[in-house]
Image (spheres, rainbow, N blue to C red):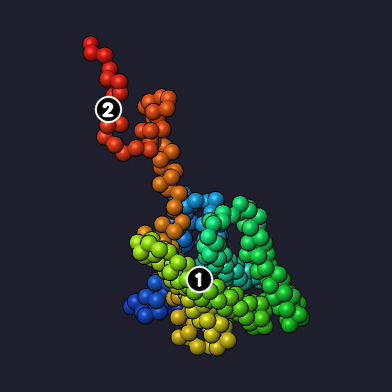
Amino acid sequence: MDTLYTARLHGFLNENKTVMDANLTEEGVLSLLIVLGSSLSLVSLVFAFITYSLFSDLRNLSGTTLMNLLAALFMTQLLYVLGVGGAMDSELCLAMASALHYSRLCVFSWTLLMTHNMYMQYQTGLHLVPVTDSNISRNFIKYSIFGWGLPSLLLLGGVIGHSYNKKGIYNAHELKKQNCWFLDKNAFIYGLVIPSYLMAGLTFYYLARSAFLSRYIVNMQPDKRLRDKMQSKRTVQIILFTKITLVLCSCLALAAASKLTDSTGIWIAFHIVQGLQGIQISMLVTCNCQVLKLYTRSLKSKASKHIPNYTAGPSASGVNKSTSLQMLTWDPPPDLV
């Protein structure tokens, strides 16, 4: 199978070309960077997922939404790598294109849910009396239905539209031209591009509202040190979600441009951004200590529970809660031998 990606970009051998240049061409260097970038993206996403699964507070709704986003990104990157060689079978090609279509929608839906959860947390900060969310499980079920269910409905509509336009669901000739990465034109535009940018628009809306609420809540604090601390934390969170959304939107824009045009430059640019997308997002969420602190607030409280206790009775709690050097001495002193 001779496609633009396999024959021109990667320089793989095919039945029409049996002799390749010995010199390392620009296409060869670019193909090597794309393969390495895609592999590193998968590894970095796995590392980010393990990091948050081990050190984050899983009872926190914001932590679970972030982990679901990382899972959707990993699924997208994996399907992208699997589609490099394309698929000769029509059913397999349609299945790969549909799965990648679904995973891309899941990425945007979970990004929207993250910003919505942040906005709801900022709203609770307006209350004079702290409000704790006692229905985390119920809210997470609602988020899961939206995050994984809405893309399923959009995918179903896209597959039905693809089947109707092609006069048969197993005709995947147009899909094979682009390595089974996209559905046909109508399904791609109306089932992926438009819904994804609508969700991205809502994401930016919640980011703007969250920034406004954050500034209002911070100005309500009487202590300057507390204001600076809250301002720093909320600024890091808003900037993080903004960067993630911009990376996803730029990748989808290049995908749409490469799908609708025959530009080789745009097609190559899409593969570069798609290959490095996982690395960029995983670095945003793991390589900043301030970001990690947003999801690891329970580390200190958990660590205090594992302090060895060598005393018994009421004095045990006193040792755990005190930093005085007097508590390290024997009281009463032991008998002399």
Instruction: Report, in whole angstroms, how far the alpha carbon at label 2 lies from the one at label 1.
Output: 50 Å
Q: Residues within 10 Å of mark 1 (few under 14, many from 20)?
A: some
The answer, for residue 209, to whether it is visible in the render is yes
The answer, for residue 207, to whether it is visible in the render is no
Q: Is residue 158 above or below residue 82?
A: below
| Disc 2 secondary structure class | loop
Percent from the top left, x then y, of residue 140? 62, 57
Q: Is residue 152 left or right of residue 264?
A: right
Please tell me which residue is depicted at 47% across the width and 71% down the height of the picture: 216
Percent from the top left, x then y, of residue 122? 52, 65
Residue closer to the observer: 4 or 55: 55
Please tell me which residue is depicted at 40% across the width and 76% down the height of the picture: 30
Tag 2–tag 1 contact (CB < 8 Å): no
Percent from the top left, x then y, of residue 275? 46, 71
Residue closer to the observer: 207 or 58: 207
Residue closer to the observer: 280 or 260: 280
| Disc 1 secondary structure class | helix
Quarter occupied by the N terminus: bottom right
Please tell me which residue is depicted at 43% across the width and 38% down the height of the picture: 305
The amino acid sitting under disc 1 is: Leu
**Residue located beneath label 2 in the image:** 329
Taking the view exactly as shown, the residue that stands out farthest to the top is 337
Please tell me which residue is depicted at 38% across the width and 26% down the height of the picture: 311
**Residue located beneath label 1 in the image:** 213
The amino acid sitting under disc 2 is: Thr
Q: Is residue 37 left or right of residue 111?
A: left
Quarter occupied by the C terminus: top left
Res. 138 image quadrant: bottom right
Residue closer to the observer: 325 or 145: 325
Q: Earlier in the sequence, mark 2 or mark 1?
A: 1
Res. 170 image quadrant: bottom right
